[in-house]
Every structure is written in C-alpha cells, then in structure tokens.
C-alpha cells in the first residue's frame, strides 16, 4: 500500500514522479515583482524637478532603463550637500497597497548621450559625469516618519544598482533621497521597489 503524506495546506509547487514511483513536490519560488512600476499601480512624484513636463518623475517608474531621449529621465538641479533648508531632492514612489519589499533597483545615466541598451544589474558606468553619485532609499513607517534603509550609497560608480535588504520591510511609501550628482545635478532613469 502506498504511503500517504499530508502536505501543509496552502503549499504550492510542482509534483513530479521519481524513478521509484514516488511523487516529489518541489516548492514554487515566488517571482519577484517590481511594485514601483506604473503598470503595477506605482505612482512617482518628486519634491522638485528641473522641468516636470520635459523630465517627468513618471520616467522613473515606467520600466525603461535605457536613455533613448530626455523624456526617459527625471532631472533635478543642485543636489549636492549641504542643502538649503527643505530643499533636498526626493523621488517618491507610492505603491498601490502595502507590500513586503526585499530589493531596490536604481538606474542612473551610464554614459553621456543617448543609448538604447539597458544596463544589467550592477553594471559599472561607461563614461561621463552626469550620473548620481549618492543616494539613500527610505520608507515611511506606520507613524509617518521617513526611515533610512540599508541602501545608502556614496561614490556611486554603477549605472544600475540592485540592492538586497537583509530583512524585508513592509510599506506603501518609498523615496530616493538624492545626496550627490557628478556634476551637481541629479538624473534618475529608474527607481524599482521589488518584493514577492
């Protein structure tokens, strides 16, 4: 008589048969989702912009990490510290609902001039001096205070940084606090908020 094994309710995966006639269950690994994407209900806004019509905050959550034209980047002037009071530059992402988040992606200009090939995760900058050099990812806690995550970058040399959190956080509101630009200005191609 075959042995009956009770699986935990709610367990999902793939059943396969091994060579001896036993059924094996491989647990399904959840696919990460970029909740910041406009297509997934994410909304991008900014504390300020060079020209919100020409360089809209919404360029930072449209899923495009290339730079084929100016409309694919959010640009803000004068981002290097020290900041005048209440004048630090922030790119905000509001998710459609509270999500468990474990990873962030930040894409900045990888070279001077337009390009259509998207950078891969942790790709080093090619050329130029128009990229973000410093930023911190923050989230809003249940008391409404902005809290720094462990993603705090200075001296950035990556065109596209994927940063994993040691412990996931749950939230709806996230922001990228810009702390430096190679030429004193900030240019952000994409801000991603990943979870499962």
Image (cartoon, rainbow, N blue to C red):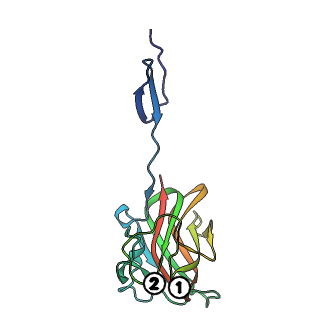
In the foreground, 156 or 177: 156
The residue under the point 60% across, 87% down is 80
The N terminus, quarter of image: top left
For the point 53% across and 59% down, which residue is it? 103
Which residue lies under the disc numbered 2? Answer: 112
Asked if the residue at tag 2 contacts the one at tag 1, i.e. Cβ–Cβ closer than 8 Å, the answer is: yes
Looking at the rendered structure, the number of numbered marks drawn on it comes to 2
- Percent x, y of residue 73: 41, 79
Residue 92 versus residue 33: which sits nearer the camera? 33
Give x and y (percent) for residue 167.
61, 54
Question: Quarter of the image holding residue 36?
Answer: bottom left
Q: What kind of element bears circle 2?
A: loop
In the image, is 157 to the left or to the right of 113?
A: right
Q: Nearer the viewer, residue 9 or 18?
A: 18
| SS under mark 1 | loop
Distance from disc 1 to disc 2, alpha carbons, whole Å, reads 7 Å
Q: Residue 124, relative to residue 40: is it above or below? A: below
Q: In this rendered view, identify the residue nearer to me: 111 or 62.
A: 111
Sequence order check: which comes first, mark 1 or mark 2? 2
């Amino acid at each position: 008589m075959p042995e009956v094994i009770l699986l935990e309710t709610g367990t999902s995966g793939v059943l396969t048969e091994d060579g001896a006639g036993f059924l094996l269950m491989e647990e399904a690994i959840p696919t990460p989702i970029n909740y910041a994407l406009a297509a997934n209900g994410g909304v991008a806004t900014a504390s300020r912009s060079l020209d919100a019509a020409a360089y809209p905050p919404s360029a930072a959550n449209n899923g495009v990490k290339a730079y084929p034209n100016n409309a694919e980047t959010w640009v803000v002037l004068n981002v290097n510290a020290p900041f005048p009071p209440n004048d630090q530059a922030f790119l905000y992402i509001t998710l459609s609902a509270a999500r468990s988040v474990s990873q962030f992606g930040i894409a900045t200009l990888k070279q001077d001039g337009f390009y259509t090939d998207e950078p891969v995760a942790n790709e080093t900058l090619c050329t130029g001096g128009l990229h973000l050099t410093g930023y911190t990812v923050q989230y809003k806690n249940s008391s409404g205070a902005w809290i720094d995550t462990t993603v705090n970058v200075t001296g950035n040399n990556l065109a596209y940084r994927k940063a994993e959190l040691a412990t996931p956080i749950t939230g709806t509101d996230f922001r990228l606090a810009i702390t430096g630009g190679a030429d004193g200005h900030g240019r952000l191609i994409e801000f991603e908020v990943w979870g499962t």
